[in-house]
Amino acid sequence: MFLPSNFWSNLPQVELQKDDTHVWYISLQASTHDLSYFSQLLNEEEKKRAAKFHFEKHRIHFTVARAVMRILLGKYLNKEAREVQFYYQERGKPYVQELIHFNISHSGDRALFAVNKNYELGVDIEFMRDNVSCEQIATRYFSQTEIIELAKTTNKKLAFFRGWSRKEAYIKAIGDGLTMPLASFYVPLMATENLSIHHNDPRTWGLWNLEVGENYTGAIVVQTLNTNIRKYTYDG
Ligand SMILES: CC(C)(COP(=O)(O)OP(=O)(O)OC[C@H]1O[C@@H](n2cnc3c(N)ncnc32)[C@H](O)[C@@H]1OP(=O)(O)O)[C@@H](O)C(=O)NCCC(=O)NCCS
């Protein structure tokens, strides 16, 4: 289950062990009351960004995701949510000056936030909507091996979205975002265990599948093969 908004105001301090990666499953649905609580945690620049969204749904999702990211980082860093200061890499990846790595992703009305003390990481969640031309998009963006794998798979929607979220998690871990050609590396599309990325990067990157509920899929990439992925949901 995904964490409801009233959970956040009472969250205790959280300890992050050096061998662990924490992944938080977050619901972006918020009542008017929750939204005003979340909004006041944002800085002026973030409030301006929220105000620019054309659709209210997107404004709410951005506000909740950003506020929860502040709350969680505050808990790990022993700071107030409002005191967390974000900096941005060249391609927009947010970071803080303290020794902690994190990344967030949102899709539909859900988000995943991941954090690790020692290793860079990227996370991605995808709502698996219908009416997506999976094979057409794959032909344009996926590597040759992935395109062949997709053609052989019966559940094309699942294979496509799993592949897409794994690829996004990787480019987000590196920080390049979509400026990195998605066809320049390979991820398995359907397997869920013992996943690895085939790429030219001399650094080690571990890939894990994340089960994020019906109609969603998720993935995390961490710059190590040796970390325990611990999921935080409402049920504990
Ligand atoms: C990173 C990227 C792939 C995210 O795609 P997405 O599917 O829309 O979004 P997700 O929900 O998975 O992730 C969004 C979050 O990732 C983080 N993020 C932003 N840029 C990032 C990057 N380059 N690498 C990793 N994470 C990034 C942010 O926290 C963002 O949340 P926010 O929009 O609420 O601030 C896409 O935005 C991208 O390619 N950006 C790079 C574009 C670029 O080169 N910009 C240069 C000028 S800033």
Image (cartoon, grey):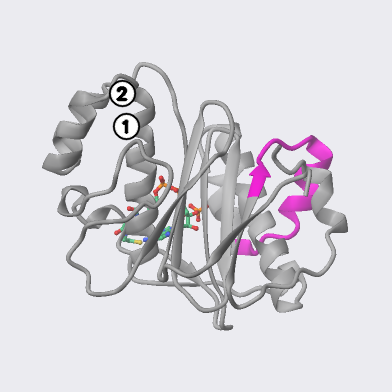
Three-letter amino acid code of the residue under disc 2: Lys
Q: Is mark 1 within 8 Å of ligand 1?
A: no
Left or right of 175, for residue 211: right
Instruction: Give the residue at the far left of this rendering.
Output: 144
Q: Nearer the viewer, residue 31 or 116?
A: 116
Per the image, the residue denoted by label 2 is 156
SS class, disc 2: helix
Residue 194 is left or right of residue 83, and the answer is left
Please tell me how many numbered marks the rendered image carries.
2
Part of the protein shown in magenta: 25-44
Residue 59 tag number:
none
The residue identified by callout 1 is: 160
Determine the residue positioned at 37% across, 34% down: 161
> Where's residue 154, x and y in %?
30, 19
Residue 2 % position (x, y): 69, 40
On whether residue 37 falls in the magenta region, the answer is yes
Where is the N terminus found, in terms of image quarters?
A: top right
The secondary element bearing badge 1 is classed as helix
The amino acid marked with disc number 1 is: Phe
Q: Are marks 1 and 2 in contact (CB under 8 Å)?
A: yes
Is 33 displayed left or right of 49 in the figure? Answer: right
User: Which image quadrant is residue 228 in?
Assistant: bottom right
Distance of label 1 from label 2 (alpha carbons): 6 Å
Name which quarter of the figure residue 222 lies in.
bottom left
Task: Bin the neighbour count of mark 1 within 10 Å (Cα to Cα): few under 14, some 14-19, many 20 and up.
Answer: many
| Residue 54 rendering spot, x and y as whole percentages | 50, 35
In the displayed orientation, state which residue is furthest to the bottom.
Answer: 98
